[in-house]
């Protein structure tokens, strides 16, 4: 059976991940003792590759030794942790994505007098970083449903911001909801356009196919959101590597779409396509 495969054009590393990994590669040529505070990106295959090159993942500044070079990952760090690192006598490579940095600065500037309403995942490292820049009370919510359960004050003006990789469509619904409830707010444009474009394209392809394959780390927030988005319009599977493709499952579909998260390497996507093509 001939199977049609529609591959999204916006796959592979986004600018922030690409920059962070280039900085890590360069640092590896200059230092033998390299550590990242938390995983550099949420892709286990990439992390394995760097672990084999000796890159350590640490979970707190207390684990750092004087000889270490410490890389701040694309998601950024909470302000107090960054300050703690800078107080140590160590080399620091800041690989915070410029768009995350921009979101941190915007939040700091726009919460001097306004409480922050933040649309983001509670446990996500980027969100922990963004919260630390707020100069005022923070109300964090993961969905429109959760926002509806919060008690908001109509006499205050809130600053509304989002984790960079959140769903643009839901963010617009959030703004409509707040307007309807007569809540005063100022919106910060912190959703990354790379994420938005990837989501829109994935959705477009999902509408044309019988099965959508989403490739990327199971811990990657932006990959999980792509999976959630396409699941609203078609069947989907979320895989990390070609090994998870089940031949019997694939054989049921004539038209398959492929998208991938911002931390998924091109080689892994190519391997999935090659395996799909080998299934008759
Ligand atoms: S998805 Fe956007 S904000 Fe996040 S690391 Fe990539 S470029 Fe930066």
Image: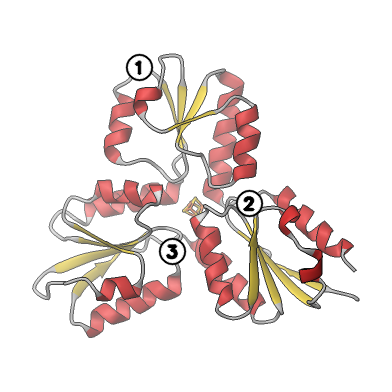
* Disc 3 target residue: 166
Q: Earlier in the sequence, mark 2 or mark 1?
A: 1
**Quadrant of the frame with the N terminus:** bottom right
Q: Position of residue 136 (x, y in %)?
A: 16, 54
Closer-to-camera residue (178/146): 146
- The CA span between labels 1 and 3 is 36 Å
Q: Residue farthest to the front?
A: 248
Which sits in the foreground, 108 or 231?
Answer: 231
Give how far across and how far down residue 263 sits, in percent. Answer: 58, 50
x and y, in percent, of residue 80 in the image: 26, 36
Identify the residue at image location x=38%, y=58%.
121
Q: Residue at x 19, y 56 (%)?
A: 111
Q: Which residue is most to the top?
A: 67
Query: Can you tell me whether the CB of the residue at mark 2 lies under 8 Å from the nearest atom of ligand 1?
Result: no
| Callout 3 secondary element | loop
Q: CA distance from mark 2 to mark 1?
A: 34 Å
How packed mark 1 is, by other alpha carbons closer than 10 Å (few <14, some 14-19, many 20 or more), is few
Residue that badge 1 annotates:
89
168 vs 208: above or below: above
Label 3 near label 1: C-beta < 8 Å? no
Residue 157: mark in rendering: none
In the rendered structure, the answer to whether residue 157 lies left or right of residue 105 reads left
Q: CA distance from mark 2 to mark 3?
A: 17 Å
């Amino acid at each position: 059976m001939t199977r049609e495969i529609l591959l999204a054009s916006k796959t592979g590393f986004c600018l922030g991940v690409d920059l962070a990994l280039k900085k890590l590669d360069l640092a590896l040529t200059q230092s033998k003792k390299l550590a990242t505070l938390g995983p550099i990106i949420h892709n286990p295959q990439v992390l394995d590759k760097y672990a084999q090159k000796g890159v350590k993942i640490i979970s707190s500044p207390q684990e750092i030794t004087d000889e270490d070079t410490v890389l701040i990952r694309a998601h950024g760090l909470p302000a107090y942790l960054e300050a703690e690192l800078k107080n140590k006598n160590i080399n620091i490579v800041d690989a915070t994505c410029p768009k995350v940095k921009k979101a941190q600065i915007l939040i700091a500037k726009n919460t001097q007098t306004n409480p922050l309403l933040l649309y983001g995942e509670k446990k996500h490292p980027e969100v922990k970083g963004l919260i630390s820049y707020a100069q005022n009370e923070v109300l964090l919510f993961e969905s429109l449903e959760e926002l509806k359960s919060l008690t908001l004050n109509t006499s205050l003006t809130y600053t509304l911001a989002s984790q960079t990789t959140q769903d643009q469509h839901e963010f617009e619904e959030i703004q409509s909801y707040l307007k309807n409830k007569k809540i005063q707010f100022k919106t910060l444009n912190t959703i990354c356009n790379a994420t938005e474009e990837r989501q829109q394209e994935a959705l477009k392809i999902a509408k044309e196919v019988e099965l959508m394959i989403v490739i990327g780390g199971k811990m990657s927030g932006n990959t999980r959101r792509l999976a959630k988005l396409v699941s609203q319009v078609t069947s989907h599977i979320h895989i990390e590597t070609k090994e998870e493709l089940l031949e019997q499952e694939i054989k049921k579909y004539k038209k398959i779409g492929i998208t991938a998260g911002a931390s998924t390497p091109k080689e892994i996507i190519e391997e999935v396509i090659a395996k799909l093509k080998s299934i008759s």
